[in-house]
Amino acid sequence: MDSTPELNEDGIKQYQLLIRSLQWLITLERFDIATAVMTMARFRVAPREGHLDCLKHMYGYLCKMKAGAIRVRTDQPNYVELPDRSNEWARSIYGNAEELVPHNAPPALGKAVVLTTYIDANLYHDMITGRSVTGILHLINQTPFEWFSKRQATIKTATYGSEFVAARIAVEQIIDVRTTMRYLGVTV
């Protein structure tokens, strides 16, 4: 909802270059700026002066937080302090549902890994269209290895709906990751 003047041709090129650099940085390691860059990338065609100022603030944040990096931690996470929420799934609508395990996967070798996924949805992230944003972070043991941030394709009027869409996307990614790990011979 920026009402500042639109950038001239040189400003647009500068804006596009800055966005492209930030997108590469996200690919390399800095997933903490993924949602902000995804939001600002929408204005690549006709950015305004206020959008360029926002990008400059992102670069200022990156300069201030130079130590941001992904730490590789191979030990399994300790979830002992989490509350035990055991459910009787046999009595639910899912009945005796089981995970589909590929029958032609190689035998698992080595230590088992724990896959953890964090998801969130930001309701009305885009005030003009009313769309929410999904954010997903996948970890193997305690190391982040995949992240995802995207504007949702549908408009939801309640937090429940946008969180449900985010959860559906996350479940699809989890199934893919678990299957890939099994084909790589990893004990999940």
Image (cartoon, rainbow, N blue to C red):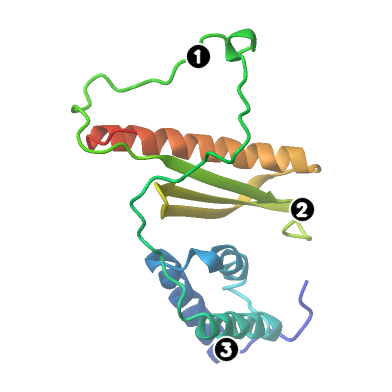
Q: Is residue 11 above or below residue 55?
A: below
Mark 3 or 2: in front is 2
Residue 81 in picture, x, y percent from top left: 58, 41
Residue that mark 3 sits on: 11
Residue at (55% x, 47% y) in the render? 118
Q: Earlier in the sequence, mark 1 or mark 2?
A: 1
Q: Position of residue 144 (x, y in %)?
A: 42, 55
Provide residue 28's location: percent of width, then percent of height.
Answer: 37, 67
In the rendered structure, which disc, 1 or 3, sits on the residue that comes first in sequence? 3
* Up-down relation of residue 30 to residue 66 (above or below): above
Which residue is drawn at the image coordinates 33% and 52% (left, top)?
74
Q: Amino acid at mark 2?
A: Gly
* Mark 1 neighbour class, 10 Å CA radius: few under 14, some 14 to 19, many 20 or more: few
The residue that appears at 63% across and 46% down in the rendered structure is: 153
Question: In the depicted view, which residue is nearer to us: 18 or 85?
Answer: 85
Q: Nearer the viewer, mark 1 or mark 3?
A: 1
Which mark, by number, is residue 130? Answer: 2
Of the numbered discs in the image, which one, if any, rests on residue 47?
none
In terms of secondary structure, where does tag 3 sit?
Answer: helix
Any mark on residue 97, and which? Answer: 1
In the rendered image, the vertical position of residue 98 relative to residue 66, given as above or below = above
Q: Are marks 3 and 2 in contact (CB under 8 Å)?
A: no
> Helix, strand or loop at disc 2?
loop
